[in-house]
Image (cartoon, rainbow, N blue to C red):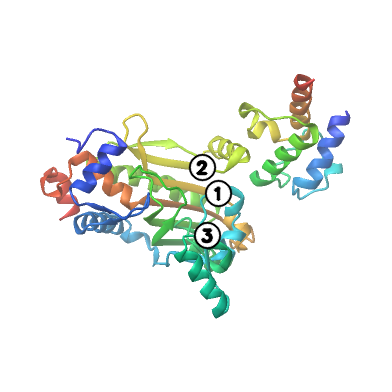
Amino acid sequence: MSNEIKVRTILKEHGRLAREVEGLAPDTDLYQAGMTSHASVNVMLALEGEFDIEFPDHMLKRSVFESIASITSAVDELTATAQ
Amino acid sequence: MSATDYDAQKFHEGLVKHGLIVPVGVQGIFGRSGVFEDVLERFNALVTDLARDDGAEYFVFPPTIDRKVLEKSDYMDSFPNLAGTVFSFKGKELTARQLSEAIHAGESWEKYESMTDVVLNPAACYPVYPSFSGTVPKEGRLVTMFNWVFRNEPSPEPTRMQSFRVREFVRCGTPDQVVEWRDMWLKRGMTLLESLGLPVQAEVASDPFFGKGGKMLAVSQREQQLKFEVLVPVISRENPTAVCSFNYHQEHFGEAFAIRTEDGKIANTACLGFGLERLVMALFQTHGFDPGAWPSAVRAKLWP
């Protein structure tokens, strides 16, 4: 759960979303909510910094960054392997 | 019969030996001969003929553009390593003397220069977008251009140039207008190149975005099938060279330059460009270094 809160904070800072992050459901499509491809790169780099993780190439795709749930699940996976 | 083996160095040597290109000492920059230019102009004329009834407005822009266009379009977010920014000297005479002394002493002199308001044009479609700002007519906009492009990627490989020309088309309008136009040209472009005896294939492609974030942008571009390339073997059979490229930018430039369609929505844009030097090289490699000896069907198309 704490990962999701941090993900929301990063989205708020870097996602350039057209809507308030607080009001987004975990499965809301972030691209539909206004996140551009460039913004999603900033989100990815900020997540790497915040969680001290590295996204492998196979995770650098739209489906991984399309919702708060999908991002959180990727972060959960990467932080678990990092430990 | 191909001019040389499908090998970058052999093909480069062949072009030089036949006087078609003139090396100038910097990789990716070279002179073009009259024969080379004749083929280039003939091909460009064929494209003009093909699009004659499309009603495209024709423009030529210089190789330098307003730096703000680069800044507004996120170019530096995507390709900072490829950009060419123009610097010049703005100091007083005493500093000019120091600049001169540094140069003659073989020392670095970049600290004496500062950024100007212009950059080298990084992509053939960029100069036109500021002129689209506002609301485009119901039928959208269609523009064609003949522009020089700069990419900071020196390479000994002849098809990878730092400076080259592109015959460009840009469509602006609703998503349907833009995609329909792009699909029409994809077929048309393939047919044109096939009629010149070139073994073409079309593929979904991605731009060479910078860094790890760039990998993500490239995957996203491929997933959405936003870029197509038409490829012909020139220096390698396994990795054919892109001679024509189609980019669907969706709302990217519409947003950056406040371009709207009649219904008030942000306009979509797409562009296609024929890499003219690469096309000429593809013709030389495919048919030989002497255009006089090219197959008669190909000659009849280019020199009707």
Q: Identify the secondary structure beneath mark 1.
A: loop
User: Where residue B233 appears, x then y in whole percent?
Assistant: 31, 36
Residue B281 placement, left or right of B261:
left
Given the image, what chain letter belongs to the residue carrying mark 2?
A: B
Residue A44 placement, left or right of B227:
right
State the separation of the CA atoms marked 1 and 3: 25 Å
Q: Quadrant of the C terminus of chain B?
A: bottom left
Q: Identify the secondary structure beneath mark 2.
A: loop
Disc nearest the viewer among 1 and 3: 3
User: Where residue B299 appears, x then y in whole percent?
Assistant: 15, 49
The three-letter amino acid code for the residue at tag 1 is Phe
User: Where residue A10 appears, x then y in whole percent?
Assistant: 80, 41
Q: Residue pushed farthest bottom? A: B93
| Mark 1 in CB contact with mark 3 (< 8 angstroms) | no
The three-letter amino acid code for the residue at tag 2 is Pro
State the separation of the CA atoms marked 1 and 2: 8 Å
Disc nearest the viewer among 2 and 3: 3
For residue B245, above or below residue A6: below
Given the image, what chain letter belongs to the residue carrying mark 3?
A: B
Tell me the residue that label 3 is attached to.
B108
The three-letter amino acid code for the residue at tag 3 is Ser
| Mark 1 in CB contact with mark 2 (< 8 angstroms) | yes
Q: Are marks 2 and 3 on the same chain?
A: yes
| Mark 2 in CB contact with mark 3 (< 8 angstroms) | no
State the separation of the CA atoms marked 2 and 3: 30 Å
- Of labels 2 and 3, earlier in sequence is 3
Q: Quadrant of the N terminus of chain B?
A: top left
- Of labels 1 and 3, earlier in sequence is 1
Tell me the residue that label 1 is attached to.
B79
- Of labels 1 and 2, earlier in sequence is 1
Residue closer to the observer: B169 or B3: B3
